[in-house]
Amino acid sequence: MSKQMSHLDDIPSTPGKFKMEKSPFVHNRLRWHSSLAKLTFWSFIFLGLILIFFFRSPSSNPLPQDPSRRSLRTYNWGGPAWEKRVRSSACVRSHNGISVLVTGAAGFVGTHVSAALKRRGDGVLGLDNFNDYYDPSLKRARQALLERSGVFIVEGDINDSALLRKLFEVVAFTHVMHLAAQAGVRYAMENPGSYVHSNIAGLVSLLEVCKSANPQPAIVWASSSSVYGLNTKVPFSEKDRTDQPASLYAATKKAGEEIAHTYNHIYGLSLTGLRFFTVYGPWGRPDMAYFFFTRDILKGKSIPIFEAANHGTVARDFTYIDDVVKGCLAALDTAEKSTGSGGKKKGPAQLRVYNLGNTSPVPVSDLVSILERLLKVNAKRDIMKLPRNGDVQFTHANISLAQRELGYKPSTDLQTGLKKFVRWYLGYYNGGKKAAG
Ligand SMILES: O=C(O)[C@H]1O[C@H](OP(=O)(O)OP(=O)(O)OC[C@H]2O[C@@H](n3ccc(=O)[nH]c3=O)[C@H](O)[C@@H]2O)[C@H](O)[C@@H](O)[C@@H]1O
């Protein structure tokens, strides 16, 4: 793609030099030899450069069977028709509307946030690499949904700086809602590289382009409740320590918060991190417990329910998607402008972190009971010891900061939210007959 082209363009071109030195009147042997020697010399240099390029290029030296590479395939983008779609999707249609680049737009939260922004007349352009961490057909279905409301999702990776630069060339985004990430706590044991690739390298790649954009956008991005890690003080407040992550996933999100601090400090980027607490709802992620519990209960398969030592309860502050979307929009609306331009800081910029939780943790066993009632099927419960693979025993958000500064006020309890999820699930998977990924 254009990134690779620019590498190739960097290779020094030498033929002009040969022409200059070759006199049409002098054909002596020495001269011929020296030209041949030069030709051989430059051919070696050229070959050497090509080899260096291939060995350093991320897409040409894949680690065998490294699934983090799944998102590095080549995407087609560019051209007048593509640019027209990008511009039209990002076009603001309401007075005082904002123009937002939503990364991870085919993801669970990304789809809901994009649709909500579009509904109120903001300009929205999606970006997603459609990787196969979970069933990509669900992502395609979300894409079709957004397409119908006028949101175009560009297919590409946040690590593709040439693509990101192009998007900022075509549209002067006022805001970026950065939701593209490798999610999931337990999968980090299987594929650690994918977390570093998306949550660290991808974030830096995006911030690099944002800092150089003119104007610089304000950025709101998804951190995670998992940054509280082994913290035992409840409810979790933004002031609590976050230096004991229990999973690599959590560590990459914590790293993201520190990286955000750096880009805010050096370049004047306005940055807001949102710590999401186990977000659930219609169009959700099939790798999450409430989703695959539903699938497996309907199939009559047993479900593993974790418990802590001495039959200790494992609980989560499950937060309904609509509440989280309101928090995301409020974070965008209250974000101050970045202060830098052209990669230079002009003054101090806003740096914020908020918990977006529900403030009422529910034991996982209660989640299963609610699902049993809604599905009218008894679950086959397989009680297991909480594995040591990154899970923490409980989460509980203190949301007073978000309440005060964003007007965030979650209003959906787990019973109500799961009812909406189950209704969607049964409709989408045709009463459980279609396979859920
Ligand atoms: O709050 C967050 O920041 C995180 O929330 C979720 O992580 P988690 O809370 O672990 O969500 P699930 O994987 O759906 O697990 C929910 C609960 O079910 C439990 N569980 C999970 C899987 C299982 O087989 N059995 C089981 O009892 C877990 O221990 C946990 O208490 C998301 O998966 C993360 O991407 C997100 O960042």
Image (tube, grey):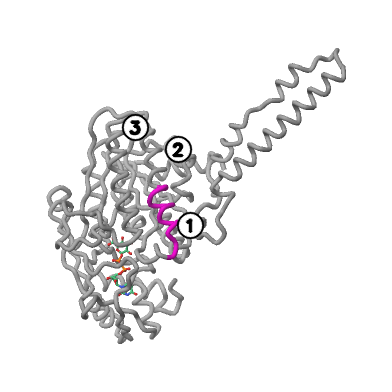
The residues bearing labels 1 and 2 have C-alpha atoms spaced at a distance of: 23 Å
Q: Quadrant of the N terminus?
A: top right
Magenta: predominant secondary structure element?
Answer: helix
Taking the spot 15% from the left edge, 58% from the top edge, the residue there is 398
> Image quarter for residue 277?
bottom left
Q: Give the percent coordinates (x, y) of residue 431.
A: 39, 79
In this view, the residue in front, 399 or 80, is 399
Label 2 sits on a secondary structure element that is helix
Figure quarter occupied by ligand 1: bottom left
The residues bearing labels 3 and 1 have C-alpha atoms spaced at a distance of: 32 Å
* Labelled disc at residue 80: none
Q: Is mark 3 within 8 Å of ligand 1?
A: no
Q: Is residue 219 magenta?
A: no
Q: Give the percent coordinates (x, y) of residue 215.
A: 34, 32
The residues bearing labels 3 and 2 have C-alpha atoms spaced at a distance of: 13 Å
User: What's the residue type where badge 3 is placed?
Assistant: Pro
Dot 1 corresponds to which residue? 68
Label 1 sits on a secondary structure element that is helix
Q: Is residue 199 magenta?
A: yes
Dot 2 corresponds to which residue? 165
User: What's the residue type where badge 1 is placed?
Assistant: Ser
Residue that lies at the very extreme toward the right in this rendered image? 28
The answer to whether one can see residue 423 in this image is no
Dot 3 corresponds to which residue? 215
Q: Which residues are magenta?
A: 190-202
